[in-house]
Structures are given as structure tokens and as C-alpha cells.
Amino acid sequence: MALAKQVEITQLESIQGGMAQFYQPQTSDETMLVQMPANSIDDLFVHRHQTDQLLVVRGSFVLVILENRRYRYIPLSEQVPQLVKIPVGVAHSSINFSNQPCILVNAVLRHGPAIERDYRPMKPPQPYDLDQARAALAELEFAMPQVA
């Protein structure tokens, strides 16, 4: 029996060098800088030949994962450096509630050539629960250290 594909969330470790904080870059076959528009809700996508490795570098957004026909809302922010690894075959989307675009790095791992179907939106089984997504983001923002 094959193990279910799981989204992995990892806190990035860093080292201090003077005033700069250095984070380990992720191994990848292709690295993309992605801009998610302000106030946007994206379609669901399923990649069949790539693993996405996402890191927010400016702003925040909610990653939506479809697991067992239910949505999981994962808040991500530049204030909490985390790497999210989305394996092959996991349906995912994004919601940016902010009035500012969100910038992230996607360190893509290729498992074969990209195919057109990988970027074709799929019909969601049910609407997103925007209140639940907002609550997840608010919880992350509440837990972040406050800057004086």
C-alpha cells in the first residue's frame, strides 16, 4: 500500500551574519519568482510532474490544499519563514486577502517534463470557506512577534 502524499511545512533555519539573516536555499531544478495579485483567489491546480517548494519573501497568503475532498488552509507570511513542499498529485490553490501583491519563491523539483495539464485549472468540489481561510491567516498574524 502506497503512503498518502503529504504537504510538508518546515521552519527554515538560519544563521546570523552581522545584521543579515542567512537562510539555506532549496535544491531545485528550476527556481521561479512568483507574484500573486492583491485581493485574489486562484484556481485549484494539480501538478503531475513537479513538486512545488514555496517560500514567501514579501506579504502573506493562504495556501489551500485539497485533502480527502476537504480544504486545508495554510497561512504563510514573510514574517514566519517556512518552506511548504507540495508533492506531485496534491491539488492546491492560493488566496491573497491583502491589498498588496504577495511575492514568493518556488524552487521547483521536476519529475518529468512539464505538461499542459499541470497548469490547467480544475473545478473545485465545493467553494472555499473564506471565513476559515481568513481565520487561519489572522491566527498566524496574532502569533507573530510584534515589532516595536
Image (tube, grey):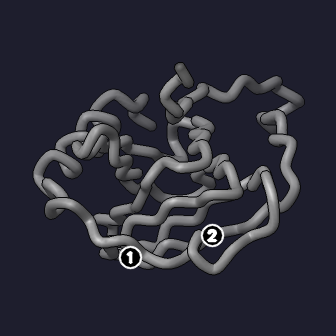
* Secondary structure category for the residue under label 2: strand
Q: Residue at x 40, y 61 (%)?
A: 94
* Secondary structure category for the residue under label 1: loop
130 vs 15, nearest the viewer: 130
Q: Residue at x 34, y 63 (%)?
A: 95
The three-letter code of the residue at mark 2 reads: Val
Left or right: residue 60 versus residue 56 is left
Residue 115 point in image, percent of width and height: 69, 74
According to the picture, the residue beneath numbered tag 2 turns out to be 34
Left or right: residue 3 versus residue 27 is left
Q: Residue at x 53, y 49 (%)?
A: 89
Left or right: residue 88 versus residue 62 is right
According to the picture, the residue beneath numbered tag 1 turns out to be 38
| Residue 26, placed above or below residue 126 | above
Image quarter hosting the C terminus: top left
| Residue 102, placed above or below residue 29 | below
